[in-house]
Image (tube, helix red, strand yellow):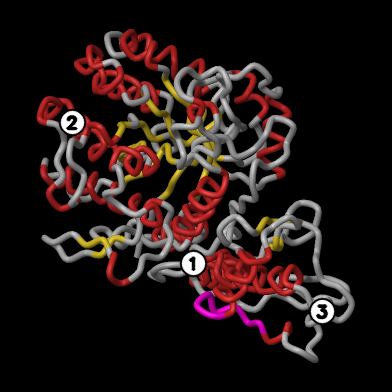
Amino acid sequence: MDPMIPCVWRINIFLLLIFMFSNASGAYVGVNIGTDMTDLPSPVEVVALLKTHQISHVRLFDADHRMLNALANTSIEVMVGVTNEEVLGIGQSPSKAASWVTKNVAAYLPETNITAIAVGSEVLTTIPNAAPVLVPALNYIHRALVAANLNFQVKVSSPQSMDVIPKSFPPSTASFNSTWNSTMYQLLQFLKNTGSYYMLNAYPYYDFVKGNGLFPIDYALFKPLPKNKQIIDSNTLFQYSSMLDAMVDAAYYSMKALNFPEIPVIVTETGWPWLGGSNEPDATMDNAEAYNNNLIRRALNNSGTPSQPKLPINAYIYELFNENNRPGPISEQNWGVIFTNGSSVYPLTLTSDSNQVNASGIGLFCVAKPDADPTALKAGLDWACGQGQANCSAIQDGQPCFEPNDIHNHSSYAYNDYFQRKQSSGGTCNFDGTATTTTINPSHGSCIFTGSSGSGGVPLPPLEAPGPSSPSSKASVQQISWVVFLFPAILIALVQR
């Protein structure tokens, strides 16, 4: 036997273990960072915010050198962008593409963890005259990465809007606009050849608003639907629990129609505005909070769509900050999840641990608003303790949370118990506008609110895993644990052979 074989075998096993470990964490949710605002924080301040909020993936719409320097040595995965203005030149000049890669990618690796390049943004629908050079631009950028030996580290694709799919429901009949068939075929062939993914900008907010009541808002917000309102594709009998799932599947079926059935989809933009004008009633903080938190839970359960259950949905929330200089209606300026002073627009958890506390170490609770109408509170209390399945035993006569015996106290306890138990499966802190979230622990005396921790508190009971569990987040944690446990022992054994 060749004496080199054991050595090669050991190296292969070593690489396999590294691969298992690096992929054990499953799906992720990142954020887009726009810059069209008057008070943009410095790159160093932005990166500090990313770290504080445990954001592991970001997408830049350009390749700002100050941001790339600030992101160095953070391990945050970065998607940089070729702007639409740059696409025309790069698509006609391999030398310009090579120069762009050298200047904006190679110069920062490996310190800055650049893993993807988005070539343009919605090029086909925003600057259709650039369609003939879009795929050449992708090819030239990729060739430059190959020449720099970076093509395995950095993937190349081009984000497309849902507008390239004229009719997205039912998903099984979706197909790309025939105007773009030639370009889309070339794009998909490129993605297949390079092992890249289809970048999709998908906004259920816009589809819901345009639908004029065609679909219930709960469907757009990832909230459970009653049995008589389930959304089903009549051709496949697949049941869709959210509009985003249907949009992603529409992209999969559109690619399948061009004979590219297995290219994964990554959602490069999605979100919900938290403020709008008088003619934008659905752009509210409650809806934005529900959408983005439920999106995170949906993505991090590590499951795919009905047609592609083994391909998890990775997504980038649009966006980190409000961009007050964007033109258009008020909602266009209010998609951000963090204010520029570092405070959250609304509570948002970017990890799979639904019991996570915020940076101050204090948990998030749901309580009745001080000025809420008592009649409305009574209705909310009855719903929470009944259909909402909150555990209301502690507010019964003689129990620890009965006193003070008033509707505000009892509603706060019931609201919070429901919120803590159900938020992972779509429950929110709203109750027809009578509830709000707080970081102040409402526990008092021997009355301990669900979700409390630390001195005198009790841990939150395990929550139901949101959505499908194939595989579950728990399974991912177990996989990491086994790899971490076995890795040193196996590696030592291999080295000693």
In x, y percent, where is residue 6? 43, 63
Where is mark 2, residue-wise? 184
Looking at the image, can residue 437 be seen?
yes
Image quarter of residue 265? top left
390 magenta-colored: yes
Per the model, the C-alpha gap separating discs 2 and 1 is 36 Å
Per the model, the C-alpha gap separating discs 1 and 3 is 26 Å
Where is mark 1, residue-wise? 425
Residue in front for this viewpoint, 79 or 492? 79
Instruction: Look at label 2 and name its amino acid.
Output: Met
User: Who's the residue at 27% across and 9% down the image?
Assistant: 92
- Tell me the magenta residue range: 386-392
Q: Are marks 2 and 1 in contact (CB under 8 Å)?
A: no
Whether 146 is drawn above or below 234: the answer is: above
Could you tell me which quadrant the N terminus lies in? bottom left
Looking at the image, can residue 490 be seen?
no
In x, y percent, where is residue 310? 32, 61
Q: Earlier in the sequence, mark 2 or mark 3?
A: 2
In x, y percent, where is residue 433? 60, 55
Image quarter of residue 341? top right
Element at badge 2?
A: helix
